[in-house]
Image: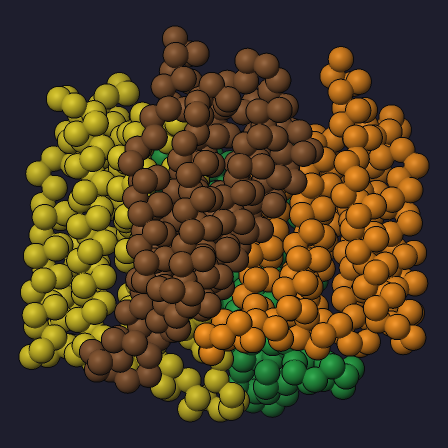
Chain colours: A brown, B yellow, C green, D orange
């Protein structure tokens, strides 16, 4: 199996996840602008999750771009990642509806953490299959973003007991770290193709 | 990354948006024809949004057809556009359920405006990446539709205070302007390929 | 624009329509087998609509297989067809929840009729664009199924006043007529390729 | 029609099924951790179904990989399989909300059984179309997993009267049997390509 099918299926699942998250934004019954006020935290948590799913889609594509042969282990590591991503709408909705209360914020952090671990597992599965001289291994280099993120998620989860607001600030910070364009993989691939 | 993945992912998200909008048409409990009467404004707002999303899908494809290399900036500009399109089901549902009341109509206009701006930003991102002699720049020409639409949306938003009906008429007018087949991009591309 | 994008987008929308129809099968609260009894008509109407959407998907693919260049008119004729198909979940749910009562059955017939007309319009749009010697025109031949179906839908709609059961029987009959494999287009294409 | 369209449409439907299953995990209203306790069985049944749909996606792809020409019979055998898979969200939700009670567990078993039969029918349809020397026939070999699974599902359905817990254990066991990587088809294909 080539990587085309894996990409297409992942694209499908991620496209659906990113779109059904918006269903948590329930249409209010009244027609006044005041009806929108309680929706603000739901909207903000949607924006945060949209950016996170966008980052995952982006990185997932770069990662598969550095992959040629697809093994059974990769298929399941990929489904494992999609499983945790599929919990984003639930975690996002719970956090938004409860105005960033402690427990829902902690659960959101747990889902972010599990997705980050699943991404790492998929990455290592590909690197192991590529053997020594793995293009992906060269491409990710020291992978400081991939290593720092889970640590920050754990800190955020612990910090929710004391202040959910600080936890949210950490989630936003991690998203910003990833939004800074990551040209590592592109560079290594460009060098290989040259 | 080629434009194929970007097209496929955008197609997926737009296909889902256009389809979940119809979920706002809630199945009534009774079986008489009178049950359908309160659904009429919901249906009409669905038709309007279906046409708008159809126009975006159409133009989006023509735009990407004039794009070869895809940069990280384009990926994020595209996700930004998809974000605003993903709010169509919410804005459509709120406007329809409240029978085109002032505030929901204004919000619908805001979502249309933000999507138009996001489309413009994506267009400029591609043109900037293509440098002087950009095919897309030639293709869109003076882009009077792209420049007129946001102005009309702003007028419609302001007009809702006075008459939501006039605002709706403006939304319908803008949709009709875009429905007139736009052969500009096709023409320029055809000339380039000749 | 080639036909690939049109196929992919239509596939996406049809896949979503066929899948969200099942959401009308609401999970009951109790755990006894008696909870399933009121769901039976909902289930039966789901089966009928699943078969209809399957037939449309099937025929749509055969039709596009006989199409090479895609024009703007085809794009909009295709969106028009998808619009009526997108009303299947609503019409199916209303008919199922009201145990095949007269009005919901009539509305179901109207949606079937409009989808059949939209399909016919799309077909004629492609034939007109292909000009004399159109492959599609040869492929569909006398198109007796396409001409008979709308007539039967109109009969079924009128008959609901007298007996919704007869209308349902007509819907099932039309589905069976289409289920009989249609080798016309395949044959003509095979002859052309030979 | 090549197998590409069939794969793409099936991918779309399966991606949507796997994702809408998570919608049964309804966002609770309170913000305490105790709100999550009643969701645990819903979550567990989601995990089980996610794995099952993942297995189907996996096997479906391997099966189509050993298929070249697609016939009308295959299209309908494939839609028949997708129909039963589309009932996973309903069966999963009912079983989860009722904490693995007898009847919902039995229905879950029935859906698993019907999907397994539909898969077998699709497989035989492809083998029959390929005629003697069918690659797929060689690839599946004695197909002991495909033959054992329906038997175990029937046992599980019968056992729910006595103990739903044993039935669940059987469902988990069958999933584990399939999760063991199945290199049969890959091996035969590799030999053919060599």
- Locate residue C66, reporting x and y percent: 52, 37
Image quadrant in which you'd find residue D23: bottom right
- Locate residue B75, reporting x and y percent: 32, 38
In-image side of D169 versus C146 (left or right): right
Q: Residue at x 23, y 61 (%)?
A: B111
Q: Residue at x 21, y 69 (%)?
A: B107
Residue C48 visible here:
no
Between A5 and B51, the one lying in front of the other is A5
Between A174 and D70, the one lying in front of the other is A174
Q: Residue at x 40, y 58 (%)?
A: A159
- Locate residue A114, reporting x and y percent: 54, 49
Q: Residue at x 37, y 24 (%)?
A: A184
Q: Residue furthest front?
A: A162
Residue A182 visible here:
yes
The number of numbered badges drawn on the structure is 0
- Locate residue C83, reporting x and y percent: 42, 61
Between A157 and D134, the one lying in front of the other is A157
Residue A69's place in the image compared with C44, above or below, is above
In-image side of A137 versus D190 (left or right): left
Q: Residue furthest top?
A: A194
In-image side of B99 versus D31 (left or right): left
The C terminus of chain A lies in quadrant: top left
Residue C101's place in the image compared with C139, above or below, is below
Image quadrant in which you'd find residue A62: top left
The N terminus of chain A lies in quadrant: top right
């Amino acid at each position: 199996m080539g990587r085309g099918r894996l990409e297409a299926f992942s694209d499908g699942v991620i496209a659906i996840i990113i779109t059904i998250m918006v269903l948590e934004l329930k249409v209010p019954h009244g027609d006044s602008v005041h009806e929108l006020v309680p929706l603000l935290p739901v909207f903000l948590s949607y924006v945060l999750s949209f950016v996170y799913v966008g980052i995952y889609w982006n990185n997932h594509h770069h990662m598969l771009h550095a992959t040629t042969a697809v093994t059974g282990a990769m298929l399941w590591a990929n489904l494992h990642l999609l499983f945790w991503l599929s919990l984003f709408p639930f975690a996002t909705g719970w956090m938004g509806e409860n105005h960033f209360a402690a427990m829902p914020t902690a659960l959101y952090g747990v889902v972010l953490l599990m997705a980050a671990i699943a991404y790492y597992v998929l990455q290592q599965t590909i690197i192991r299959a590529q053997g020594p001289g793995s293009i992906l291994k060269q491409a990710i280099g020291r992978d400081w973003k991939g290593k720092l993120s889970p640590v920050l998620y754990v800190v955020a989860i612990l910090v929710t007991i004391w202040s959910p607001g600080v936890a949210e600030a950490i989630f936003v910070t991690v998203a910003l770290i990833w939004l800074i364009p990551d040209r590592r993989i592109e560079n290594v691939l460009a060098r290989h193709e040259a």
